[in-house]
Image: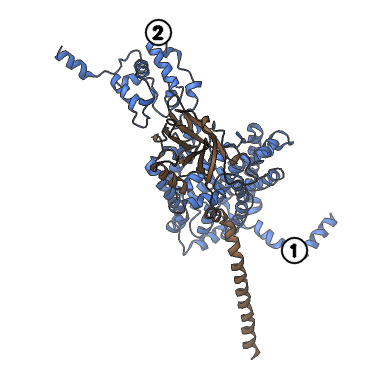
Chain colours: A blue, B brown
Amino acid sequence: MRVIKKLGEWFEQRIQLAGPVRETLEHQVPRRSASWAYVFGSAALTVFCLQLFTGILLALLYVPSAGEAWNTLQNLNHHVTMGWFIRALHGWGSNFMVAIVLIHMAQVFLFGAYKFPRELTWIVGVILLLLTLGMAFTGQVLRFDQDAYWGLGIGASISSRVPLLGPWIVKLLLGGPIIGGATLSRFFALHVFVIPGSLIAFVGLHLLLVLKLGINEWPMPGRIVRRATYIQQYHELTSEDGVPFVPNAIRKDLVFSGLVLLSIAACASFFGPFGPSGQPDPTIIQTLPRPDYPFLWLYAVLSLLPPSLETPVLLIGPVIVLAVLFTLPFFAGEGEKSWRRRPIAVLAILLVAVGLGRFTHLAGYAPWSPVMDAWSGDSIPANYLKGRTALERQGALVFQAKQCHNCHALGGIGGQRGPALDRVAVRLTQNQLIRQVIQGGGNMPAFGKNLSPAETTALVAFLKTLHPSGQMPAQDASSTISLEAHP
Amino acid sequence: MTQSNAPTRRGMLFKLGLLFNAAAGMVLAVPIVRYLLSPLIRERKPGYESWVSLGPLEQFPQGQTRLASFRNPTTNVTDGETAKVPCWVRNVDGQKLQVFAINCAHLGCPVRWFPQSGLFMCPCHGGVYYADGSRASGPPERGLFQYRYKVEQGNLLILAGEMPTTGSPTARLINMAVRRPPCV
């Protein structure tokens, strides 16, 4: 014991940091801020440390070469002892980090922590969010599989729409004219040096600001933030009703961080690593590229926007969102902090959460994409064929052979790009069916060139049988009336 | 007396030091920026595009649309399989051909050809094109990108080298190629 104490004294005589460190650890925080609502920032930092550590472990074996990266991941998954687990930890850590950063941001917003004097803390936080998303995207690229390859293509296609500079941005992004070795190398440099370096620097600044300005007090309805009086009020609060950060506040942080680490480890061991999916050979076009979780909502937005709105939304949308986030503390720097008195703030968070959640959920089954193998893989339910005439059954064959099933579901099976056709005969008359099949329209391609008259007749005969048993198919009333009038 | 002189001399040295480092920074900045912009400099001279062969014309029977692939004319030692680029070749009538980029004109995913219905379908956001590459439905705002082509000694050659994207010079060139008669 005496040796350790002597050693400690020897170092302290030279480093002289014990005083400031103790002061930092024991700084007073408002009693009510030692709360379970305030644990997300420290949890994000913990996961970031996990990511740094597992990232370095992966870098021991990963090779950032377009020809080798996929193979090194297979090697990690299948041959290296516990390689799959380290990959899984890093992948799940990434998802947890994005989620925790978003929750932290929502909490900080709802508790008014971005108001005076913590404007810069918020702005640095927004930068940290962008860097975290940057890590998620570049990380997906390093998992150099088919999703990564075509995801890069989507990134390049979006960049190419920037007016004037578009083509240059594409080449700088890809490091050349196509997605290849240079692309992976530069995303490796971003993911391993540039963005983590910036993250460490900005996390340091973020923490320094939290220490200098003090942790946000628990917002009380009616306690108004004013620039002239806030700092004095905060000091009164911490000196009259404060507790030392260590150990009073850090207990909950420690418990929650441990819980998060355990959850990541549990997900990693139960669900395993993410991919890699198929090898990044562009000539294998039988692929269904999908982005990782943090970008699924964007995938849905890109599919659902009307074509004419897409480029403006893609180019102007991010500018507006960033402008709002960066200037928020300046146009709402004073006033009420409590979310009980800020209904618009609560509604904004709910709107964003419901929007992101709904888009992410939709992207999970992508109803806008044709099901590429429904025509050959999904059968027509048997009761749609029972007791039908030969012509109607021939029509069912045409329905499959012409890939109608890729976009139209029958009995809940098949694509959802177009409407389900289980009741189509109730909606459209025979003539309308023929016109729709041959000319298309309403986002349906015209099939006239690829259907013989016999095929069209058979297909429409089949479609006319698609109505509930108790409901008559649609009929053109005018034709029967005119026939009755002039027999 | 000395107090008023000494700071000036030291101040001079400080300013000189700043100037010296600024000059060094600028000298270093030029090669660094050129290095970072090398993909653009390479594009100007000698350029990325050149004529590449897709193989003998017999591989592409009349009236059919078939998948072909080529090695990108400019490659990198670490490209591996990504140096390969696929494309769709449509032999319209034995005389006229169309060579479509694999990349959907929407956001670049690989389109698949369905000969039975005569449609190209995209698995990502649901873009659909007719056999001649024109837009049929979905989010794309235009038809498929087309490569310029020529036939030499029975081989089909296309002018390729860049990933076709909306707004890229390739896309504009391709548009012109559609309007001009192909250089057969």
Indicate the amino acid at tag 1.
Ile
Q: Nearer the viewer, residue A441 or A297?
A: A441
Residue behind mark 2? A387
- Image mark 2: chain: A
Does residue A454 lie above or below B170 as drawn? above
Residue A25: image location, x then y, percent: 66, 56
Q: Residue furthest front?
A: B153
Q: Is residue B86 visible?
A: yes
Number of the label disc, if any, that sits on residue A15: 1
Q: Quick one: A287 or B115, which is closer to the camera? A: B115
- From the image, state whether disc 1 or disc 2 is nearer to you: 2
Q: Is residue B50 above or below residue B11?
A: above
Q: Position of residue B42 (x, y in %)?
A: 56, 54
- Name the spot of residue A84 as percent of width and height, x first: 68, 36
Residue appearing at x 29%, y 23% in the figure: A432
Instruction: Give the image quarter of residue B7.
Output: bottom right
Image x and y of residue A275, in percent: 62, 35
Q: Chain of mark 1?
A: A
